[in-house]
Amino acid sequence: MHNLATKNRAAKAMSILCYPVIFLIVSAISLLAITEKLELGITTFFTVFFVIFYFVVMERINPFRHSWHPSKKEWQRDGRYFILVMIYGAIGAGIIRTISIYLAPQENALTLSQNVFLAILVSSFTGYWLHRLQHKYLSLWSFHGIHHTPNKVTTSNNVVVHLFEVIISAVTIQLIFLLLGFSAESVFIAGQFTVLQGYFIHANINVKMGWLNHLIATPELHRFHHSTNLQEAGNYGSELSIWDKAFNSFQYHPERSPQEIGVTKPHLFPAPSAIGLGILHPFKWFISSKGKRPNYSNIDKRTANRPKKVPSTTHDIG
């Protein structure tokens, strides 16, 4: 009985401390990189691997669902996707570098802390609406839906994404950064936060974030985003949850969890393991005549969670 009580206390402590610990570590890495003038790209690359390692370990120690532990085949799939995401990111970075040559942007006069604060706000706001639009329009859902095909939410399948999604998101956000004149250091720190949040919200970890759920995106919130029950599948924010609260898509149910994860019509998408078919899948939408395009789903009935100014014809695309 004593051992069980000790184990329960340890699990509770981990559920509370899991995020603060990694947040402080990533913050320290970021500060060290700036003060010691380390190469920021290499530092980001290191952070990605460290964050993945940390959350994968935590998934084994304190999982939300044991049944969500990736199988060997799922690890192999996600490893291949990870390599592709690195390639996609390099393509996006190349596009931005080319654009920056012609724009020749000037840095703004704000302090580093002001730049970081605004960069995170701008990045999270832009990401929120890009994500929401990918659920609203079937042409965009044709590639974003690939991310929703797994029936689990784990650290590793955060990278199950399509080329179009990575490039559109990266180029849009980085272009806004350029136009607003954010410094390289502030963009780096905002990017570090994005990396941390992207893997954190997908982590299969039993966390209890409490009031922080009303400020930042968390696994407790993001699992509902992957739910096949569309009445609870809001939470489009990946970094901050304040935009979900502001635009009426916030879903927080601490007393329960989603029953089923995935898409509402999985037969219309390639299997998650079919990476090549997943890459080609959106072209079925873009090259098909209007009447022959994939009928992903019916009308989304989440009218209660949508602001009045948003049209009430959002598609049911789970």
Image (cartoon, rainbow, N blue to C red):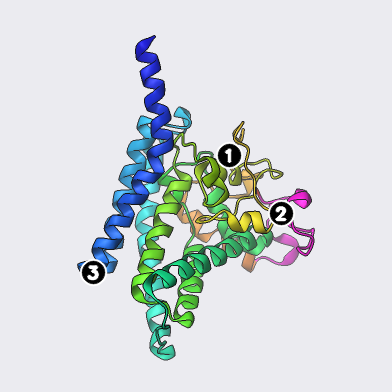
Q: Nearer the viewer, mark 3 or mark 1?
A: 3
Tag 2: amino acid: Asn
Q: Nearer the viewer, mark 1 or mark 2?
A: 1
State the SS at label 1. Answer: loop
| The stretch drawn in magenta includes residue 310 | yes
- Going 69% across and 45% down the picture, which residue do you hit? 230
Q: Earlier in the sequence, mark 3 or mark 2?
A: 3
Q: Residue drawn at (61%, 59%), measured in percent from left and top?
A: 243
The kind of residue tagged 3 is Glu
Any mark on residue 204, and which? none
CA gap, disc 3 to disc 2?
47 Å
Label 2 near label 3: C-beta < 8 Å?
A: no
Magenta-highlighted residues: 288-317
Label 3: which residue?
39
Residue 75 image position (x, y, % from top left) = 37, 41
**In the image shown, does 279 or 225 lie closer to the viewer?**
225
Residue toward you, 276 or 199: 199
Q: Nearer the viewer, residue 131 or 11?
A: 11
Locate residue 228: give its quadrant.
top right
199 displayed left or right of 264: left
**The magenta stretch spans residue 168:** no
Would residue 298 be found to the left or right of residue 286 on screen? Answer: right
**Label located before the other in sequence (3 or 1):** 3
Is residue 273 in view? no
Q: Is residue 15 visible?
A: yes
Q: Secondary structure at mark 3?
A: loop
- At label 2, counting other C-alpha atoms closer than 10 Å, the crowd grade (few under 14, some 14-19, many 20 or more) is few
Residue annotated with mark 1: 261
